[in-house]
Image (cartoon, rainbow, N blue to C red):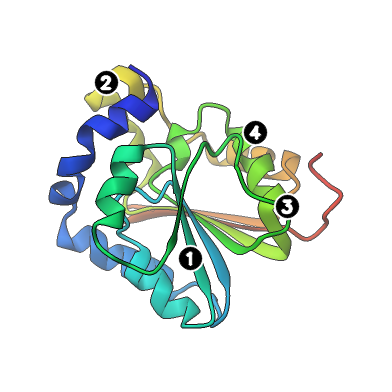
Amino acid sequence: MNHREYFDQIAAEWDGLLEERTIARLREIVAGLEIEPGAVVLDLGCGTGVLFPMLLEKVGRKGCVVALDISGGMLKQARAKGYPVEYVQGDAQNLPIQDNTFDWVICNSVFPHFLDKLRALREIHRVLKDGGRLVICHTASRETINEIHRSIGGVVANDTIPPTEEVLHLLQDAGLDRAVVRDEPDRYLVLACRENAGRGR
């Protein structure tokens, strides 16, 4: 079983696993981002669309949210909610998106599942506009997230968040600057920016 098949299999029950405190924490995280009205945002690894109402509130009517996931099953669940977002099925390591498209790329609860993290980050760099920003977020610490995946086992057993220094090196190698990593008991948050279009290639 590969990752796409795994997430297709659990898509129908995914929302039932979301606790209210998780959603509240995500609201806090998104509220703290400086996403301006009119922004173009990629929800990368959107799953069933938990972030859609939060992101749509930020970007307003003149903005745009694009929802991308490798799993057709997850996208089916997301579409059923009827939010006005654009849906794309694709792989983070080979994004079917033009260069310099997004003001923000949000990776919620998906970064550990990128098998080639550097390649995925380079793709994120490519689709960000100059000055565009990347957000990687989870609603628990790195250690907790990694243990959850180990305990699930199977295809996600080795899907981990690397140590902070390794994450910072990956971001730098991908051409993403001004990186900050926060690893706290109730959240894991990475912020970075594309400042120089020529780097990371």
Query: Which residue: 29% across, 64% down?
Result: 25
Q: Earlier in the sequence, mark 4 or mark 1?
A: 1
Q: Earlier in the sequence, mark 3 or mark 2?
A: 3
Residue with the most extreme right position: 198
Distance of label 1 from label 3 (alpha carbons): 16 Å
> Label 2: how many residues lie within 10 Å, few (<14), some (14-19) or many (20+)?
few
Kindly indicate the quadrant of the structure image that contains residue 22. bottom left
Whole-percent x and y of residue 200? 79, 42
Query: Which residue: 54% across, 64% down?
Result: 41
Distance of label 4 from label 2 (alpha carbons): 24 Å
Which residue bears the numbered disc 2? 153
Which residue bears the numbered disc 1? 65
Which residue bears the numbered disc 4? 119
> Label 4: how many residues lie within 10 Å, few (<14), some (14-19) or many (20+)?
some
Give the SS element for disc 4: helix
Asked if residue 54 is positioned above or below residue 110 in the image, the reply reads: below
Q: Earlier in the sequence, mark 1 or mark 2?
A: 1
Whole-percent x and y of residue 153? 26, 20
Kindly indicate the quadrant of the structure image that contains residue 8. top left
> Foreground mark, 1 or 2?
1
> Label 3: how many residues lie within 10 Å, few (<14), some (14-19) or many (20+)?
some
Give the SS element for disc 3: loop
> Are dots 4 and 1 in contact, CB under 8 Å?
no
Which residue bears the numbered disc 3? 99
Q: Earlier in the sequence, mark 4 or mark 2?
A: 4
Taking depth in this image into account, of 121 and 150 the one nearest to the observer is: 121
Q: Earlier in the sequence, mark 3 or mark 4?
A: 3
Which amino acid, mark 4?
Answer: Arg
Asked if residue 201 is positioned above or below residue 32 in the image, the reply reads: above
Whole-percent x and y of residue 172? 73, 44
